[in-house]
Image (cartoon, rainbow, N blue to C red):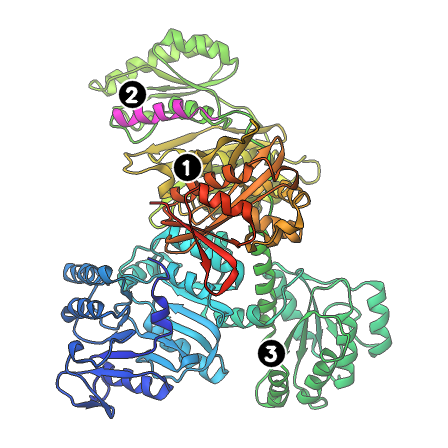
Amino acid sequence: MSIRNLDKMFKPGSVAVIGASDKPRSVGSSLMGNLLQAGFSGPILPVNPRAAAVHGIMAYKDVASLPMTPDLAVIATPPDTVPALISELGARGTRAAVILTSGFAEGEAKVGRERAAQLLAAARPHLLRVVGPNCLGIAVPGIGLNATFAPAALLPGNIAFLTQSGAMATTVLDWALPRRIGFSAIVSMGDMSDVDFGDLLDYFALDDATQAILIYAEAVTHARKFMSAARRAARVKPVIVVKSGRAEEGARAATSHTGALAGADVVYDAAFRRAGMLRVNEVEELFDAAATLATMSPQQGNRLAIVTNGGGAGVLATDRLIEEGGKLATLGADTLAKLNAVLPSTWSHANPIDIIGDADAARYSHAVEVMLQDPDSDGLLVSYCPTSIGSSGDAAKGLIDVLQKPGMPKKNVFACWMGHASVQDGRARLVAANVPDFETPERAVRAFMYLVRYRQSQELLLETPSSVTPSTPADTERARALVKQALDDGREWLDPAEVASFFACYGVPFARTEAVVDPAAAAKLAAEIKGPVALKIRSRDITHKSDVGGVALNLATPAEVEAAARAMNERVARAKPKAKLEGFIVQEMVQRPGAYELITGVSTDVTFGPVILFGHGGTAVEILRDKSLELPPLNTALARAQIERTRIAALLKGFRDRPPADIDGVVNVLVQLSRIVADHAEISEIDINPLLCDARGVVGVDGRIRVRAASGPAQARLAIRPYPQSLESEIKTPDGASYALRPIKPEDEPALRRFAEQVDVQDLWHSAFALLRERSHETAARLSQIDYDREMTMLAWEGDRIAGLARSTADPDFDEAEAAVIIRADLRDKGLARQLLQAQLAAIAAQGVHRAVLVYPAKLARLNTIAIELGFDIVADAADATTARATKVLK
């Protein structure tokens, strides 16, 4: 389930409190007190078998005695009573419950896991949604709902805070109150037995009262659902996350706390980045980031200008800016001249712009006005340090006056009034004028960089990959046969010859490596390789070959190879008389002096499944720790960005007399690794180290592939659904014309923009195609980069031109998907719309959607006819006679 019935959770008309109490310091008493004090306008129904009233409100002895069915039930009773209560509430029609009680899935107790299973079994038949158990509760301050036992009062606001830790919720609420930070909702999720991060991200992404979503996470469950919801939410509003368990010990503590398995922290980094979420390290950063992203304009670049009355503050800000990856703006000649005209001669004449300690309101105004107009900076930090000459209030007035001046260019401005007692007047003025103020230069710079990184993450989501296809089609059948042979033999590792053969199936360059049966065959192969080779004994009974003399290196001639093979056979037979010797592995010894040693590979994370690795390789890989992870599937843009995140990327681009290395070749290897894990569920680990890279190309020298029996399809284990190649086909129109049909890809963005210029503007009536009106890279990229798990766009191609497009988006529950179709203007009367829409219905059904919907102007007779031919039931819209609605059950 996803957002179904969550409106009863967060917009209830009535609330029952099961376990309400007057007992001091009890959960039931605190809960009732908070509900009453928050001002909830609906009925509050306390349930207590031994009390006539609780907190002055008439109480009921059990659920059956309630005079009405509550929308929301909050339960604080012993754990053994909870499943029966959920069953009884569900039978009455309650559709949402918050369970504060602990004693379920947290920890390792078997009885707790059994209770959790009973709880879900009781809720599911009634579609009753559960937050918790083992949680603090939920609150929606805007409607006066505080169904928590938190001690702090809550302010309404536009931030949704989702947390797995109840203690963290109380801490954050206590921290937020004096800072006047309000919330659209607070959800303490506890064990997440039902409602999880995916559900809540889906819900609050659509919530108009929420402008930013904050998450405190210990572990994620249902990775694909989480990634799908997170990617969708992050496209419409900022999503900022603090993830605990960064250290291994912290991850273990999180596991025992939430009852969920915590994956490797670096993999969480990759997942959050891929979704477009912003990760921060501390709770204070969480709210700084939220306040900044929710209230400031999109950031256009990373060049920061600094205006300060104290040189030290400017230096601190500069240090943090460079550490965070920003740039100190360079002052151009025109800007320098303008500053010289309004500042004393002793100013710094550089950025940071030190306007000297005696700066008054006018000097602040003049300097800020010049920098707002400066074309070579993207943001402005204005700092004030207390002096006995100037006034913090005057300095703030100077800043505010120029920001409110009509016609002034808009640029994000970050104030930093340093100190405490002597700057209260200035800070009060800044708050009143809605100018963001930070206590230290470092925090102000950090806020600027939140905007920069958020913008970068959104741009990466919309980057168009190259349309270059692999030069060699994959031989998937041969690759599957190699994997099957290893599994049939009871092996978990492919041998070196199989590894090389497997990589060849996907066009991954690898040192020539083959298996031979005897010394003569080894010598013959060495003669073909024409260079030094390595010789290894081949035996599945011997794991550590070098320990028994089963490895020989740098054999230069066929004669040396044959002699070494005969000696190796005798040596190994003496050392391991029971081992079955199956021949030899002969491998080319690649000679690439000066080539960079890289590492690429695949590992399988317990939460997010397969993960692609790239980094600086060689024997010192563990010491260098220069690596980047990415979730598959990868395209060329994502692979290139993964490379850019490493330190060795700068070397690969070339320097001094070193030419650039073949980065495109590395990109191809990463994309092929992504393809491999999508094709083979049995592959759990791949390692290529080193992958040599220089201007001549890339080649793998040593590689390993680990396999294990798989119970499901390969793509099911990926956290992000890959491109559904199975939907590719061909359609024919009544006039005999054929069109290639396939799902949209990110690299279709240029063709999509051309298509937008070739459709009739009158055909853009559906909201699904509204973005085509703008004909920009950004809008076309948003249409071409979709979540194949919930969205689907099918393209009909006439050669290299898009002939038509059908699009649909399923609701989070996969109950319904609204579809729409648009055809190029010159092909509207060819019958293509019907064929394309029929193919779209098949794609929607493959996603598991229950029902397809068409909503269109009733006057569109052509579409009405198509709907009837495809088996839709058509009804007029009761609220709008000009609109028709057609539905079709798919399964």
Residue 624 seen from this side: no
The one nearer the camera, 463 or 97, is 97
**Where does label 3 land, which residue?**
437
Task: Locate residue 331 relative to residue 583 in the image: left or right.
Answer: right
Residue at point 34%, 71% (across, down): 9
Image coords of residue 770 (percent x, y): 60, 54
**First-in-chain label (1 vs 3):** 3
**Label 1 close to label 2 by CB (< 8 Å):** no
Which stretch appears magenta? Answer: 474-488
Discs 1/3, front: 1
Q: Secondary structure at mark 3?
A: loop
Q: Which mark is residue 21?
A: none
Q: Is residue 559 visible?
A: yes
Q: Does 725 sit above or below residue 110?
A: above
- The answer to if 477 sits in the magenta stretch is yes
Question: Label 1 belongs to which residue?
Answer: 678
